[in-house]
Image (spheres, coloured by chain):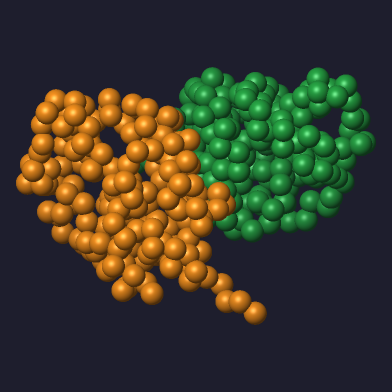
Chain colours: A green, B orange
C-alpha cells in the first residue's frame, strides 16, 4: 500500500522560471540599461523595472524565459517523492496563461496538466510545503515555507521561512 | 472592523457556464443529432457526446457558451457577502484558458482576476463552501458542499451534499 505523499507547491516565476533574467534582458534591449544587483536589491519587479507592464504584456515574455539552474532535475526528483504542484499567480496577465502551459510542457514534460494551478491569489491553495520567492505568498501559508532568494527579497529578514539560494539547497532539505 | 468572509468556491462548467447546452448545440450542428435528457442521464460529458474531444478543443467552444440562468445576478449578490472564487478545472484544455478568462470578463465583470483559479484537480483548493456539478470535486472537499444538478448527476444519490436545481435555490440557501 502506498503512503500518502506530501503536497509540495512550487512557484513558477522566480523559482523555476528566470523571470528576473527576462526583465534584465528586456530592459537592456528596450532602453540599453543594465541594472546591477545592487540597483535591484529589495525592489519588487514592478518597482525595479520601469517598463515592467510593457514587458509582461508582450508576447513571448514568459515563454522565452530560461529555467532556473538546477530546477528541472530537482523537480523531477522531488516529483517521485512528493505530490508536486506548480502554482503560479498568472491571472493578472491573461496572455501568460497559454505561454506558461507551453513553457511547462517544454521544460517539465514529466509533469501532467493535473499538477498545474494558475490563480490570482495563493490564499486558497493548501499543501504541506510551499517554495516561493514572495513573502506575500509564504506568510499566510500554513505548512513548511521555503523562501527562494531573488534580488527583491535578498535584503529582507527571512522571518519564519527557510531561505535557500538555489535548487541544490532545496534538494538537500527535501530529499 | 470587518468580519472575515467565508470562502465560496464556484465551479464554472455546468454551474455558471452552460457547457452542456454547448455540447448539445455542437453535436446537432456537427452530426444532426439531438439527444434527449433521457439519453444523457447519468453519463459524464465524454460518455454522452461522441465527439466531446473535438468540441472542447475547437476554438470558441468555451467563449460562446451561455451563462446558466440566474447565475450572473446570484453571483453578484453572493460576491457582496462571501469571498467568491471561480474555480475551474481548465488545464486539460489549454485553449480554454484565455477563452474562460475572456468569458468571465464579459459576463462577470464585477469579479476581479484575483478571484479566478484554473487548476488540473481541485484537491489543492480549500474554502468554506463549494458549488460544483461533479462528485469527484465535492466528495473530497472539507467544507459545505452544494451539488448543482446536471444530466450527468441527476440519477445519482446526492450523498452528503445538498442538491440544488438552479441559482434561485442557491440564493435561498446562502443568502
Position of B63 relative to B51 (above/below): below
Decide which of A161, A57 is in the foreground and name it.
Answer: A57
Q: Position of residue A141 (x, y in %)?
A: 61, 56
Q: Is residue B63 visible?
A: yes
Position of A59 relative to A41 (above/below): above
Q: Is residue A154 visible?
A: no
Position of A11 relative to A128 (above/below): above
Image side of residue B169 versus residue A28, left or right: left
Residue at the spot 34% in from the left edge and 70% down from the top edge: B171
Residue at the spot 30% in from the left edge and 53% down from the top edge: B68
Residue at the spot 85% in from the left edge and 45% down from the top edge: A42
Q: Position of residue B31 (x, y in %)?
A: 14, 25
Image side of residue B109 versus residue B48, left or right: right
The quadrant of the image that shows the C terminus of chain B is: bottom left
Total number of numbered labels? 0
Decide which of B55, B140 is in the foreground and name it.
Answer: B55
Residue B96 found in image quarter: top left
Decide which of B83, A37 is in the foreground and name it.
Answer: B83
Q: Position of residue B151 (x, y in %)?
A: 17, 49
Q: Position of residue A173 (x, y in %)?
A: 67, 40
Decide which of A99, A154 is in the foreground and name it.
Answer: A99
Residue at the spot 22% in from the left edge and 56% down from the top edge: B149
Question: Furthest residue to the bottom?
Answer: B1
The quadrant of the image that shows the N terminus of chain B is: bottom right
Image side of residue B65 versus residue A74, left or right: left
Amino acid at each position: 500500500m502506498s503512503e500518502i505523499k506530501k503536497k509540495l507547491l512550487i512557484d513558477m516565476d522566480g523559482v523555476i522560471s528566470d523571470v528576473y533574467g527576462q526583465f534584465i534582458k528586456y530592459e537592456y534591449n528596450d532602453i540599453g540599461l543594465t541594472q546591477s544587483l545592487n540597483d535591484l536589491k529589495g525592489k519588487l519587479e514592478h518597482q525595479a523595472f520601469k517598463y515592467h507592464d510593457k514587458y509582461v504584456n508582450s508576447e513571448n515574455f514568459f515563454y522565452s524565459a530560461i529555467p532556473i539552474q538546477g530546477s528541472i532535475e530537482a523537480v523531477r526528483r522531488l516529483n517521485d517523492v512528493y505530490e508536486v504542484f506548480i502554482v503560479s499567480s498568472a491571472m493578472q496577465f491573461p496572455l501568460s496563461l497559454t505561454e506558461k502551459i507551453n513553457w511547462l510542457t517544454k521544460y517539465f514534460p514529466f509533469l501532467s496538466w493535473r499538477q498545474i494551478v494558475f490563480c490570482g491569489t495563493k490564499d486558497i491553495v493548501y499543501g504541506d510545503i510551499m517554495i516561493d520567492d514572495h513573502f506575500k505568498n509564504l506568510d499566510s501559508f500554513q505548512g513548511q515555507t521555503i523562501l527562494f532568494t531573488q534580488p527583491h527579497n535578498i535584503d529582507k529578514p527571512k522571518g519564519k521561512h527557510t531561505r535557500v539560494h538555489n535548487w541544490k539547497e532545496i534538494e538537500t532539505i527535501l530529499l
